Amino acid sequence: MEAEVIVVGAGAAGLAAARSLAERGARVVLLEARDRIGGRVWSHQGARGGIATELGAEFIHGAAPRTMALLREAGAASIDLGAESWRLGSGGTLVRDDEDFVEAARILERSRSLPADESVDAYLRRYDGDADLARRIAAARAFVEGFEAADPANASVHAIADELLSGVDSQSTRPLGGYAPVLAALQRACGAAGVDVRLSSVVQTCAWRRGHVSVDVLAPSGDVQTIRAKAAIVSVPAGVLAHRGDDGELVFEPDLPPSKREALSKIAMGHVVKIALWFRTAFWERLEDGKYRDAAFFRIGQTPVATAWTQVPVRSELLVAWTGGPAAESLGKLSPDERIERALVALSAAFGAGSVRGEFESGLTHDWSEDRFSRGAYSYVKTGGEHARKMLAEPVDEALFFAGEATSLTNGGGTVNGALESGERVAREAARVVFG
């Protein structure tokens, strides 16, 4: 055998799994389809002030012990987000409102008293006609679509309530300098442990049986190579696992068992379009005699771009525009230039066209749903999918092991920390097979 374990996917989960196994003494080959590591963590280092433009994961959710440990290992740190939030009011002006998140959480947490799961949409419709709660219901819907990147029509209200009650969403920080140092620390550790990392290597077929795995890989040269091992760790996103087409995607021989397909049918990939906008100056800090100088979030509402955020407490000329959920699907169909234009139009409505247009310099954007190696931004559980993440995480015949944020068993779905924890979990599981 050429390896003892093949790891498919060099995102946070795959890197963590490869490192952990190699440090135990296993021979590991790590295969990544992209020409870079990181998966849905994608940092572009900015030329000004050392600010990274994060087109993928940007925040740290909850206590995130594995993420924090890696930050320390990388010699980096996390910083708190700014507390100020502004929303576009009915009169078309920005008003201070720091309670949107809290109000949404309170409404959704109540759903845990329901005897049976239902969709977020069905649950929120229970409050139709209650004028006193109308704004809270709107905030809850916006939270599910924006923060969870989920479709209220099929998202499990119980799953979202469980996540809120776990505390993983109760606080958010960000890595100072972005996620690049964290991924670089993982990559260095993999190298030091002897992991054979192969980029631009697309796994086309994974044939498996107990004690033996064989993968066919489209190499950068264009040749198809076969690699054999005792076991494989599959850390590709759930959207890739669920996709069944004839366009050269990952195929399992034999197919994954029905329990896996059932789990995947109850896990959806949320849609996200993220647009990073660089301006000549942080013009918003000067508007209205500095009213927005310490603003962290601007909730723009029903425009094509729902939210924008600054880098506060770090001072920067970067604004990040964000749309999640169903609204991101139509926005994602546009070209990058058209998406950037829509973001500028939305911000102009909030700040004034003169300020936005006159200060704009450049933009970057990425649609994760159209990315064939992601097929969505991050996962959420659909109605009735209470056990879906656990089912997806279960090994198959001591040959296939599954990692990634979608398999998080600690309410870390959709987070980097959930991916890291899942990678370390499957490394322990695979080690028992490799070493007996």
Image (cartoon, grey):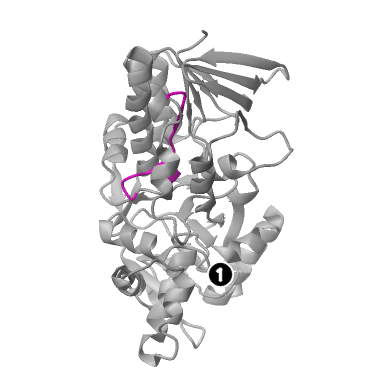
Within the image, what quadrant is residue 226 found in?
Answer: top right
Viewer-closest of 158 and 318: 158
Q: Is residue 401 magenta?
A: yes
Amino acid residing under circle 1: Leu
Q: Nearer the viewer, residue 382 or 203?
A: 382
Q: In what quadrant of the picture does the C terminus appear?
A: top left
Residue 129 against residue 290 in the figure, above or below: below
Query: At which x and y percent is residue 99?
Result: 32, 74
What residue does disc 1 label?
Answer: 347
Q: Is residue 359 visible?
A: yes
Give the image location of residue 130, x and y in percent: 39, 90
Q: Secondary structure at mark 1?
A: helix
Q: Position of residue 72 (x, y in %)?
A: 26, 34
Q: Please tell me which residue is depicted at 25% across the width and 48% down the height of the picture.
A: 63
Seen at 28% across and 30% down, the residue is 73
What residue appears at the point 45 percent right and 66 percent down from the top-left corner?
Answer: 144
Which residues are the magenta region?
398-411
Describe residue 40's horizontal placement relative to residue 215 as left or right. Answer: left
Q: Residue at x 50, y 14 (%)?
A: 229
Left or right: residue 409 compared with residue 253: left
